[in-house]
Image (tube, grey):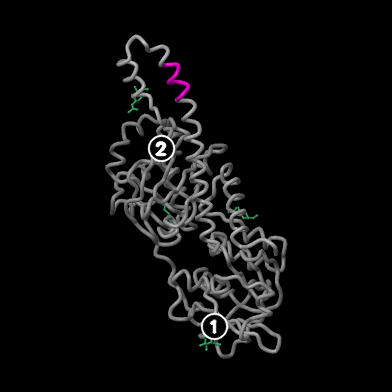
Amino acid sequence: MARSRPAILLSLAVAAVAIMAFAPAQVSATKYNITKLLEPYKQYSKFNEMLSKTRLASDINRRQTITVLAVDNAAMSALDHYSLQTIRHILSLHVLVDYYGDKKLKKLAHGSTTSSSMYQATGSASGMSGYVNITRKDGKVSFTTDDADATAKPTRYVKSIKEYPYDIAVLEVSSIISSADAEAPVPPPAPVDLIDLLSKKYCKSFASLISANADVFQTLNETKDNGLTLFCPIDSAVAAFMATYKNLTAKAKTAILLYHGVPDYFSLQLLKSNNGVVTTLATASETKEDYSYDVQNKGETVTLETRVVTSSVTATVGDMEPLAVYAVSKFLKPKELFKVVEAPAPSPEPSKRKGKAADGGDDSSDDSGDDTADKGDAAPAAMLARWVTAATTAVAALALLS
Ligand SMILES: *[C@@H]1O[C@H](CO)[C@@H](O)[C@H](O)[C@H]1NC(C)=O
Ligand SMILES: *[C@@H]1O[C@H](CO)[C@@H](O)[C@H](O)[C@H]1NC(C)=O
Ligand SMILES: *[C@@H]1O[C@H](CO)[C@@H](O)[C@H](O)[C@H]1NC(C)=O
Ligand SMILES: *[C@@H]1O[C@H](CO)[C@@H](O)[C@H](O)[C@H]1NC(C)=O
């Protein structure tokens, strides 16, 4: 390869900025969609289906530099008697948080290595049980854990299914990797009473708005078990917005409440380490409307920018994957229902008026000059803001890559 790594990274960054200027990055989606990637291979359809059911698919899509160890439909029957939570643990052991393509496996330095898995990365594993040993012996590569059942047949590398160096490698292995820790029964998540949770801390008023709207409550209640991040405005924010809220049509009330729910689970850590656009439950319910907003980090603070208002996360009300509830400082106003507030331009309206009053007679000529200056300055400033945002996102994406 003629080009150096920095040169490639730079061209990647330029390309990323160019793309993002038109289509803002999604917080949740990265380049590859594991579900789609495995779709053409019917022999792994059970494995693929389970990645979605356990929500591991979205965890995989969010990561870069990853190896997925898939098994065929016959081998998947080993999981039949486990609960979904336990299956999630077992399968997360099959997602290595490093890149192992066919080439790398066949040239393993010293014949063996130890890789951290997503089971380790999500903090569910105890001790060393989230690590997978990769060993090459007599030309055969096998995957084992320290707490494997002694009678279990070793899990062998079969073949490479799909590789995108050095982002994602999808490999077939002969069987489910054995691990006593991952196979241990997991208590089912305690049922969550959403209204109760919101009422306990910070968001009592928002809880009342939700319980008063049967459609909204049902949507939230159904989504909470499959990945939901709910941003609830604190009581004082609801009080400040109440007069405006009461003025909205019934349809707009439903939309604005759903706008506070994102149909995916985001830990606070994930929100703090990613910038990008999220779509909401209102996006899903209001066809052809956008109803998205930007999640941005300002130091340790997570802000939600709707272009009408900027609200920030002030506290965690509950984090019980797949449900996360965060208190936010302001009611989120969507640009679909409220007037967009443009970023402050260099010569804002009020100062111009002040100038007009002070200048007295000369006003007409000054005014036309001001107007031209306003238009000339405002457009590039807005453009620059977008490019800076895009560039920051690109840098963040690159940071994840390396
Ligand atoms: C991934 O692909 C599947 C199947 O094509 C699709 O249903 C799903 O919406 C995609 N996910 C994302 C985040 O694009
Ligand atoms: C896995 O690797 C670690 C560190 O290299 C080693 O201590 C351990 O014995 C290995 N376990 C197995 C089952 O090979
Ligand atoms: C909310 O969802 C749970 C399942 O998570 C269900 O048991 C409960 O009945 C639902 N509540 C209402 C009021 O529909
Ligand atoms: C509510 O609507 C009325 C009639 O359109 C308007 O006069 C009033 O200012 C609105 N109040 C708020 C708080 O938006």
The foreground one among 58 and 112 is: 112
Secondary structure at numbered mark 1: loop
- Residue density around tag 1, few if under 14, some if 14–19, many if 20 or more, within 10 Å: many
Tag 2: amino acid: Lys
Left/right of residue 129 with respect to residue 41 in the rendered view: left
Picture quadrant where residue 114 is located? bottom right
Q: Quadrant of the C terminus?
A: bottom right
Q: Which mark is residue 271?
A: none
Give the labeled residue for mark 2: 333
In the image, residue 314 above or below residue 47: above
Q: Residues within 10 Å of mark 2 (few under 14, many from 20)?
A: many
At a point 45% along the width and 55% down the height, the residue shown is 224
> Residue 205 sits in which quadrant?
top left
Q: Which residues are magenta?
A: 367-373
Query: Which residue appears at 57% of the width and 46% of the height?
Result: 20
Quadrant of the snapshot with the N terminus: bottom right
Name the image quarter holding residue 243. Answer: top left
Residue 215 seen from this side: no
- The residue at label 1 has a CB less than 8 Å from ligand 2: yes
Camera-side residue: 360 or 156?
360
Residue 333 in view, yes or no: yes
Mark 1 residue type: Thr
76 in magenta = no
The residue beneath circle 1 is 145
